Image (cartoon, helix red, strand yellow):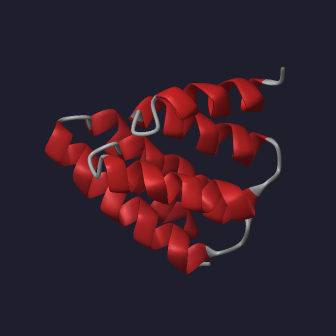
């Protein structure tokens, strides 16, 4: 059974588990399936709007896809949430990424 299949099986038991949903999004992104990964990241954020690492990973995926305006929105929102949650390292990462794509 692949890791993706394992995650999907666990989600069958716990469909609202934020970490499992995030794991699914990451696995889809790693498998080169962005059309499925992006809505999976969105689902994570619906379950927990403060799960700021999902904004970071979604932003990175959008940058890879060349969808810079969407990446800016995700990273801007994520940086604000990270600050609110007290994770200044994550906020700095997202702010740094924003600085690199601003001129694009």
Location of residue 36 with respect to 57 vertically, above or below: below
Q: Residue at x 46, y 38 (%)?
A: 15
**Is residue 16 in view?**
yes
**Is residue 102 in view?**
no
Q: Position of residue 59 (x, y in %)?
A: 54, 58
Q: Residue at x 59, y 74 (%)?
A: 68
Q: Nearer the viewer, residue 4 or 103?
A: 4
User: If the image is split into quadrants, where does the C terminus sit?
Assistant: bottom right
Furthest-top residue in this view:
1
Q: Nearer the viewer, residue 27 or 71?
A: 27
* Numbered label tally: 0
Is 81 left, or right, of 17 in this rendering?
left
Is 44 left, or right, of 69 in this rendering?
left
User: If the image is split into quadrants, where does the N terminus sit?
Assistant: top right
Location of residue 76 with respect to 104 vertically, above or below: above
Q: Position of residue 80 (x, y in %)?
A: 24, 56
Q: Position of residue 62 (x, y in %)?
A: 63, 64
Is 3 left, or right, of 55 in this rendering?
right
Q: Quadrant of residue 23?
A: top right
Q: Residue at x 72, y 64 (%)?
A: 35
Furthest-front residue in this view:
13
Q: Quadrant of residue 58?
A: bottom right
Q: Quadrant of residue 87?
A: top left
Q: Nearer the viewer, residue 18 or 72?
A: 18
Q: Residue at x 70, y 23 (%)?
A: 6
Q: Position of residue 85 (x, y in %)?
A: 18, 39
């Amino acid at each position: 059974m692949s890791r993706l299949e394992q995650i999907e099986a666990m989600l069958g038991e716990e469909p609202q588990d934020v970490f499992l949903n995030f794991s699914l999004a990451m696995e889809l992104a790693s498998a080169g399936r962005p059309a499925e990964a992006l809505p999976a990241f969105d689902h994570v954020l619906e379950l927990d709007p403060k799960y700021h690492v999902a904004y970071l990973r979604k932003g990175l995926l959008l940058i890879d896809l060349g969808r810079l305006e969407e990446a800016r929105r995700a990273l801007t929102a994520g940086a604000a949430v990270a600050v609110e949650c007290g994770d200044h390292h994550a906020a700095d990462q997202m702010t740094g990424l924003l600085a690199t794509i601003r001129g694009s």
